[in-house]
Image: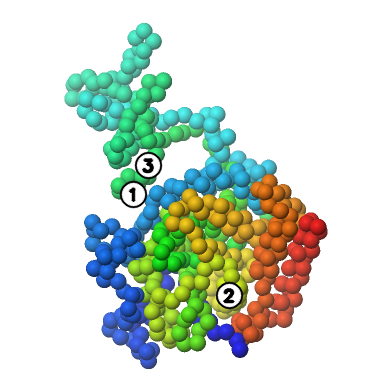
Amino acid sequence: MSNKYSFGIWDDWQSYVAAAEEGLRLDKNGNPTSAPIYYSGDNPSESTLRSESAFYEIDTSQPALPQIEFENITRFVNQAVLDKYRLMFENLQTKMDMGGVLERDRLVPTSNPIGIFSFGLASPTLYRKVEFYVPDLNILVDGLYVTMLEMNGVKNYYTTVNGKQYHVWRQQQGTQDILNNIPNAKRVMLEDGMYVSEPRSAVGADGTEYNLKFATKTKKIYLEKPKQTGEAQYIDLFVTMGGNANKNSQSFFAKSAAIIMLAEKLENAGVRTRIYASDINHNVNGGIDAALYSFVVKEYGEKIDVDRIATLTNDPRLYRGKLFAYFSGILRKISNVHQSGGSTSVLGLGDKFVKVFSTYKNFLKQQQKDGLFNSKVKDKGLMIISSLKDTSNDFDSNEDTIVEEFYRISDVAELLLSKEPEKAIRRMVERDKKRGKKLPDIKSKLKESVKNAFLVVTPDMSNEYADSKEEIEKMGERESKIISAINKVIV
């Protein structure tokens, strides 16, 4: 018997929210009502949010209900974990070999900030930008009004304010912002007499990230892939939202990290990526085996905004405060099924997950054909999903899991983009051998990734979205080519 699915796709979160709220106003006969119809647990009250503040991760010093509204949430609830992500990504960049997609010798210097920042290019001419501070007045003054006098080899700086002369300190630009906005920050003097702050970078109570400012005399301090003639390359990346009740924002965000890393690497390499937040559930009423709904959180070529992507994909305030209810609304609107949004999330790359996503890709291709979905991806194998089943509530403890997931999804992207799969596979093997992986395990992992990318949707999986004979032959040829390359490289 063929499975029954409830699928949907939206161009942005605003469209998703509008559809969900429309669905919440439908009764069981499909007729619109004046007020939303919620199920127990789908619409938390002010008192519920406060009594379970740790679960929703809200600020109890502020009104609770506004904190779970999409339009009010502009930054991820856990800024510290984003700092940890950035540090992890910076530390791993040199180790993350993506073969032909990101070969260092194929990257050229550029002044375009969308490229990869190269400390090696910038450092020879890197210098601290300066601001001038008047300690007696606790103000900054323009350098145009500062005079330097040198006596016995010592440089002193002065300015005149309202006819009176004051001593001026040279400090690195950004120092005063950090001192004014970061608790316990201190001013320290460097050997050359310039002052800087400690810490050098931090996030203030207002959510702003404050940093000391540098500049460089070299304009081309980024690396990017040279522009090539021919058709541009595009990839659609999906990441699952939410998690079990015992998971926090660190665990939630860990599921998004690998996708964001891959998008950053691919965008820098000239491959355009789109990222989707995906809600996938089973144990659904109405004979539905699974429901999968997605909306776009990052467009092709758009600069990576880690904070925004993290917020829209895996912020507990949104997922637990709103998306439970919105799942109910979407399910009601699309499939006329009424139930609580608190059904069971499908996480991890189990058999059911892979089959549901493979079927969903066929749904997306049909929507694309009908002009209802504007993806630029022509090869459905380049619709790649990331889902980690049991991430830790301590983000740092997830590093190995995140790295393994990054390599899994990046290998799929590399194999399907590469014109020379053997060359790509050899690089992957060398990379994994250096990481202590055994050849049989490397071979098994690559074959499984390829098998999942080209999984055929049969009529017993879905009558509505089964693969055509032509599509099966096409996928079979590509899969055989890549599997043959794997067998040739890894004997």
The location of residue 84, given as percent across then percent down, is 45, 48
Q: 367 or 76: which is nearer to us? A: 76
The location of residue 107, given as percent across then percent down, is 64, 44
Q: Indicate whether 327 appears above or below 242.
A: below
**Mark 2 and mark 1: Cα distance apart in space:** 40 Å
Earlier in the chain: of badge 3 and badge 2, it is: 3
Outermost bottom residue: 29
Q: Residues within 10 Å of mark 3 (few under 14, many from 20)?
A: many
Scheme by which the image is coloured: rainbow
**Residue plotted at (23% across, 30% down):** 138
**Residue plotted at (67% across, 76% down):** 456
Residue 348, quarter of the rendered image: bottom right
Say how many tags the image has: 3
Residue 297 can be seen in this image:
yes
Residue underneath mark 1? 207
**Residue plotted at (54% across, 34% down):** 122
Which of discs 2 and 1 lies nearer the camera? The answer is 2
Q: Amino acid at mark 1?
A: Gly
Residue underneath mark 3? 202
Q: 314 or 392: which is nearer to us? A: 392
Residue 203 as seen in the image, left or right of residue 457: left
Tell me the tag on residue 352.
2
Labelled pair 2, 1 in contact (Cβ < 8 Å) = no
Earlier in the chain: of badge 2 and badge 1, it is: 1
Q: Indicate whether 208 appears above or below 300.
A: above
In the rendered image, the quadrant that contains the N terminus is bottom right
